[in-house]
Image (cartoon, rainbow, N blue to C red):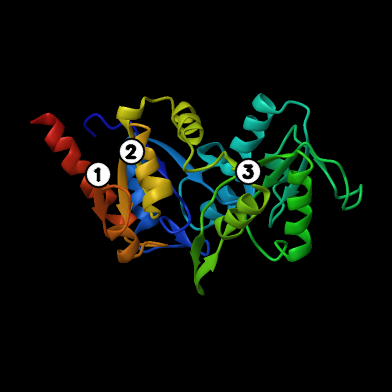
Amino acid sequence: MGSVRALLIDIDGVLTVSWRPLPGAVEALREIRAAGLGVALVTNTTSRTRASIARVLAEAGFPVSAEDILTAPAVTAAYLAEHCPGARCALLNSGDIGEDLGGVTVVGEDEGDDAVADVVVVGGAGPEFDYAALNRAFGQVQRGARLVAMHRNLYWRTDEGLQLDTGAFLVGLEKAARVEAEITGKPSAAFFEAALAHVGVGAREAVMVGDDIESDVLAAQRAGVTGVLVRTGKYLPETHRAASGTPDHVIDSFADLPALLGDLRESAQQ
């Protein structure tokens, strides 16, 4: 479709909410696949592994496999291997993501609360983010551990409404410890570089579709990728109005994406 060769697609809030498909999302992704476009599902979700996500989506009818999915934990593992090889990492996360953290040495679980860590790795928020856990992470950073966070999303949408996410806790941890976390997932430039490499296209040949105007859309645009904001998931009109930039395109839902891509194709041919 014109110069577009691949799509980077957020999952939660774009294709699904609480892992249930949004209206028209399955059909739209099937149409996109039939058009021969490359697809990478790029997500900051840290509660499930790539294989688990693929299984849930496939059962819902989406034409995807684990190879199509790029998660913040998987990118974090690659980041740690490059920048902190051999590091002992204390992990604060809600959900079992060990399968996507291959090669990462996680300490603390079998060594007691005072296990020495070189890196504190913060994933997705949940019940595990209690005072004791956050205070333990604070102490480790004070003792010299690097602070690496998979994302800094403030909230996400479930079928019960908006729920607090990592960013709400990370800001306090950063201020208390007087450090700034290294971010590995969206909106980091490294994440989008990894996503483009995953689908094998250049930034100008890709489109990012997301419900988070800052972390998904504007971050992708800063990386040279066309950004499409959907009015589903965590989308809020007030957040849109207060954003630091303007999306390239705004559509009501992912179901409208094939029509937008058709318009882009026609414009490219004129």
Q: In the image, residue 153 lies at what x, y percent?
A: 51, 54
Q: Amino acid at mark 2?
A: Gln
Q: Are the residues flagged by discs 2 and 1 in contact, CB closer than 8 Å?
A: yes
Indicate left or right for 150 with 86 as reference: left
Residue drawn at x 43%, y 47% as measured from the top left: 215
Indicate left or right for 94 with 22 as reference: right
Q: Amino acid at mark 1?
A: Asp
Q: Which residue is labeled 1 in the image?
A: 248
Nearer to me, 118 or 205: 118
Residue drawn at x 21%, y 31% as measured from the top left: 2
Q: Which quadrant of the view contains residue 218?
A: top left
Question: Which comes sooner in the sequence, label 2 or label 3?
Answer: 3
Q: Which residue is labeled 3 in the image?
A: 179
Circle 3 crowding by C-alpha within 10 Å: few under 14, some 14–19, many from 20 = some
- Which residue reaches farthest left? 270
Q: Quadrant of the N terminus?
A: top left
